[in-house]
Image: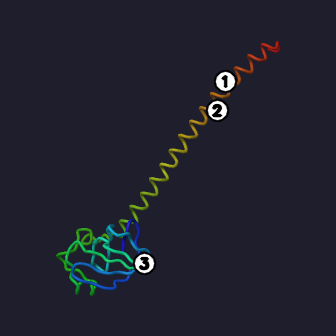
Amino acid sequence: MRAGGGWDDVCILNLSQRGLMIHSSSPAQPGSYVEIRRGAQEIVARVVWRTNNRMGLLSQRRLQVAQVISGKELPSLQRAADTLGLERRRLLRTANRNRVRARLAQFVAVGLLGAALASAAYAAVVESLGRSLSEVAFALGGG
């Protein structure tokens, strides 16, 4: 099951044409959408209710119970990505990897900007204090 960004193993406890009941170690909140994969089957459903680790899901399309149990999908229902040999979980890992790289690049950019601002502030303080100290030294007759 994919809820949010990560995949988690679940156990299907009950199955009908319009939904299913599952057991999950990390259940999703009611109202959220989840994706269940069983073999070649992909089920997109909305969480209707949740009690402890059990959830009731309402499927977006009618489920073919025999196909879900067997774990096979009809060729007419296969998605384009599946026919190209791409697996959605692999695409998700690539997206997560790109998201981490973008966060790292953003962190580096903010760090460099902070360092530049700190350097400019240091130069302004040194110049200001240097001018003031030279004026004090001149006024005291030491300059």
Q: Quadrant of the N terminus?
A: bottom left
Give the residue number, with chain letter if any, for mark 2.
122
Residue at image point 44% right, 78% down: 25
- Secondary structure beneath label 1: helix
Q: Quadrant of residue 59?
A: bottom left
C-alpha distance separating marks 3 and 2: 56 Å
C-alpha distance separating marks 1 and 3: 64 Å
Where residue 62 appears, x then y in whole percent?
19, 77
Could you tell me the amino acid type at mark 3? Asn
Which residue is more in the foreground, 119 or 29?
29
Near mark 1 (Cα within 10 A), the count class, few <14, some 14-19 or many ≥20, is few
Near mark 3 (Cα within 10 A), the count class, few <14, some 14-19 or many ≥20, is few
Where residue 69 appears, x then y in whole percent?
27, 86
Q: Quadrant of residue 126?
A: top right
- Secondary structure beneath label 3: loop
Give the residue number, with chain letter if any, for mark 1.
128
Could you tell me the amino acid type at mark 1? Ser
Where residue 53 appears, x then y in whole percent?
42, 78
Q: Nearer the viewer, mark 3 or mark 2?
A: 3
Where residue 111 appears, x then y in whole percent?
55, 45
Residue occupying the far left of the picture: 76
Q: Quadrant of residue 41?
A: bottom left
Which residue is more in the foreground, 63 or 94?
63
Looking at the image, tell me whether mark 2 or mark 1 is earlier in sequence order.
Answer: 2
Give the residue number, with chain letter if any, for mark 3.
52
Residue at image point 46% right, 58% down: 100
Image check: 39 left or right of 124? left
Looking at the image, tell me whether mark 1 or mark 3 is earlier in sequence order.
Answer: 3
Residue at image point 61% right, 32% down: 121
